[in-house]
Amino acid sequence: MAVKTEAVGKEWPATTYEVGLEKVREYANAIGASNPVHHDREIARSAGFRDVAAPPMFCVVYSAPAVGPAVLDPEVGINLATMLHGSQEFVWGEPVCVGDRITTTAGCAEIYEQDGKGFYVFETISTNQDGAEVVRGTWTNIVRGV
Amino acid sequence: MADLKPGDAVPDLKTTPDKYLPHRYAGASGDFNPIHIDKEFATAVGLPSNILHGLWMMAQVARGNAQLADGDPRALKRLSVQFRGMGFPEQELTVSGTIKSVDGGRVVVDTVAEQGGNQVIRNAEAELII
């Protein structure tokens, strides 16, 4: 059985995420990011940030609401029961700080089959309230037994 | 860090996620997939135990490489990883890396994460501006 590729090129509606102080602290604690710029407003500002800075990998928190509907879209047709997160890339731009409003769009970049597995590649682009790009993500999900 | 050159090692980052770390990371990230937080569910679907979130492990790779810039979150410009194998709570995770190229302040690192000799993140590459 071949994978369906109709969804390649599809884009999903943009989502917006407002970055909160305690969420950044909670995330930083969960990953062990102890640099005080992720916890303390004064230290972050004196280090040149607008406010407490999010760790780079906090991008998964504000991107997730955009990626979820893409992965679950019946037109894409992923069998969640046999899906694995195969690989991931992020390219960072402007740092994200508390108070930022981040808008993320998700699109389906590629669907292909290799060695009996389906590869589903999604791309996200996140920008801040000034229109500056903060991160670009490439999410590759692998589905066994397509 | 002024004298970084290809072949140099990034300092290892070692961390042991405690039993409840997947629950805290689930709350922090919003990923409540039961394979990460429910041992009974995980074993019922054929896993040895509940497993670590891949993106938590990726965050450790990010943190390990950011050591080159004293943890400055602005330094990390790109990180790509492949998730392979499963990571487990209550076992030490080691992130290591070797500098691949240095071009002015732009440093590219080959990096991996392993647990008990099993590479859980491989073929990873980090790019930093230092």
Image (tube, helix red, strand yellow):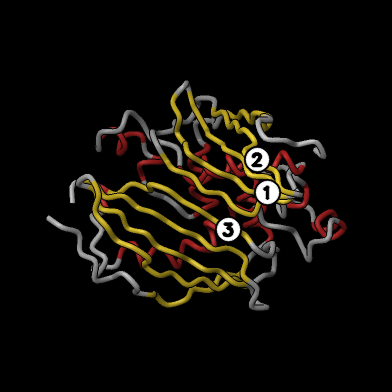
Q: From the viewer's perspective, tell me whether residue A27 is left or right of residue A53.
A: left
Please tell me which residue lies in front, B37 or B108: B108
Q: From the viewer's perspective, tell me whether residue B88 is left or right of residue A117.
A: right
Q: Which residue is mark 3?
A: A91
Tag 1: residue type?
A: Leu
The answer to whether A83 is drawn above or below residue B6 in the figure is below
Asked whether the beta carbons under mark 3 and mark 1 sit within 8 Å of each other, the answer is no
Distance between mark 1 and mark 2 Cα atoms:
8 Å
Mark identifier at residue B65: 2
Crowd rating for badge 1 (residues with CA inside 10 Å; few <14, some 14–19, many 20+): many
Q: Please report, as a chain letter, where disc 2 is located.
A: B
Residue A21 horizontal/vertical position (percent): 69, 60
Q: Which residue is mark 1?
A: B128
Q: Nearer the viewer, mark 1 or mark 2?
A: 1
Q: Secondary structure at mark 2?
A: helix
Q: Please report, as a chain letter, where disc 1 is located.
A: B
Please tell me which residue lies in front, A65 or B24: A65
Q: Please report, as a chain letter, where disc 3 is located.
A: A
Q: Residue most toward the top?
A: B116
Residue B33 horizontal/vertical position (percent): 38, 48
Residue A110 in sight = yes
Residue at coordinates 65% horizontally, 41% vertically from top-left?
A: B101
Which image quadrant is residue A130 in?
A: bottom right
